[in-house]
Amino acid sequence: MESIILRSKNKKGTDLWLGVDALGLNIHEKDDKLTSKIGFPWSEIRNISFNNKKFVLKPINKKAPDFVFYAPRLRINKQILQLCMGNHELYMHQRKPDTTEVQQMKAQAREEKHQKQLERQQVETEKKRREGVERENQPRFLGIVSSQYRNGSRQIATNSEEGCKGRRNIEDRIG
């Protein structure tokens, strides 16, 4: 991904776009800003400099020719150089090995992550075990509840019949 693309020209005066990103410098054709025509990774660049409107890119291979670009204004070359310096610094920072303190922090984070995964697995197995026990006990529980319901409904029916007999006796005495 390009951080910025700036307009420039080559020695012949052809319009080009110069892109600066985290991996290096890229040259794009005038009509195509998406795909780079030539790329210069930071590892292959020896030096970058400018003099007024002239911007020079020197590759590590000393036999290779320098790549020269011309910007319409001096300010653009200053911006390009600042972007190159910042992106190159980030590139070098990413390639630098971690300090022992950072390595210890990463190891601790990995251990904590592993511990949390183990806890999640334990909770999940306990949850499945309880669901299994509930499924096993559910029919027995339903059987107990339904038998209590049946017994209760019989008791109600019996009480209801006794109540009706008692009312009839009272009605017979009164009437």
Image (spheres, rainbow, N blue to C red):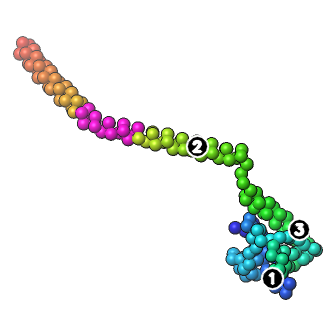
| Amino acid bearing label 2 | Glu
Judging by the rendered image, the residue that carries numbered circle 3 is 78
Q: Which residues are magenta?
A: 126-142
Q: Say which mark, if any, is on residue 15.
A: 1
Give the CA distance from mark 1 to mark 2: 54 Å
Q: Position of residue 129 (x, y in %)?
A: 36, 38
Q: Is residue 135 visible?
A: yes
Image location of residue 101, percent across then percent down: 71, 44
Q: Residue 39: image x %, image y %?
A: 74, 75
Residue 141 falls within the magenta-colored stretch: yes
Residue at 75% x, 70% y is: 41
Neighbour tally class for label 1: few under 14, some 14-19, many 20 plus, Cα within 10 Å = some
Return the residue found at the far top. Answer: 173
Sequence-wise first label, 3 or 1: 1
Quadrant of the rendered image containing residue 133: top left
Mark 3–mark 1 Cα distance, whole angstroms, equals 19 Å
Residue 87 in the figure: left or right of residue 140: right
Q: Which of the two residues, 41 or 80, is positioned nearer the viewer here?
A: 41
| Dominant secondary structure, magenta | helix
Instruction: Give the image location of residue 54, x and y in percent.
Output: 90, 77
Q: Which residue type carries mark 1?
A: Asp
* Residue sitting at x 33%, y 39%: 132
Q: Name the residue that disc number 2 marks.
A: 111
Q: Name the residue type under label 3.
A: Lys
- Where disc 3 sits, the SS reads helix
Q: Does the magenta run of residues contain 130?
A: yes
Q: Residues within 10 Å of mark 3 (few under 14, many from 20)?
A: some
